[in-house]
Amino acid sequence: DYARPFSCNKCDGALLCMDGADDSPVWSCSGCGGNDNAIAGFLQSEKEIEGELDQWESKMMMDISQCAPNAFKRQITKASKKLHPHHYLTIRAMKTYVRLCASQAVH
């Protein structure tokens, strides 16, 4: 699953799901070839970040003028560090940040 890379703890590579056909997917690093036993922690971080993004997006739908771009920028940093810069949630956070900044520029 190339949309959900996680940063490898051993090198600068990305942990990718190489075989997700069954209930126990195989994760492997694109850099060192290793597999990280901390994948459960990564998956938990993924859930946490997705929930936070959902909350921010709901808040923005209610009243976008009350959302500060600088406060949201921390979400991008968090997603990028905990997951991977190319993880779909990091990209989703960047997209949301651009939308938030554009809305603030109009005011």
Image (cartoon, grey):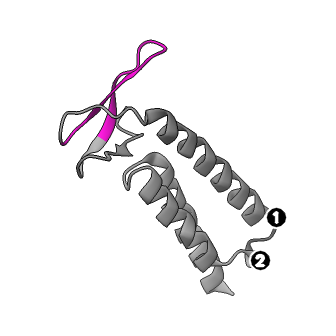
Horizontal side of 55 relative to 53 (left or right) equals: right
Using the rendered view, name the quadrant where residue 38 is placed. top left
Horizontal side of 66 relative to 39 (left or right) equals: right
Q: Assign a secondary structure to mark 2.
A: helix
Start-end of magenta stretch: 15-31
Q: Assign a secondary structure to mark 1.
A: helix
Mark 2–mark 1 distance (CA, rounded to whole Å):
9 Å
**Residue type highlighted by circle 1:** Met
Name the residue at 73% across, 65% down: 60
Q: Which residue is mark 2?
A: 66
Percent position of residue 96, x then y: 57, 63
**Residue type highlighted by circle 2:** Gln
Percent position of residue 87, x then y: 42, 48
Question: Is residue 5 shown to the viewer in this render?
Answer: yes
Q: Which residue is mark 1?
A: 62
Residue that lies at the very extreme toward the right in this rendered image: 62
Name the residue at 17% across, 39% down: 32
Residue 80 counted in the magenta span: no
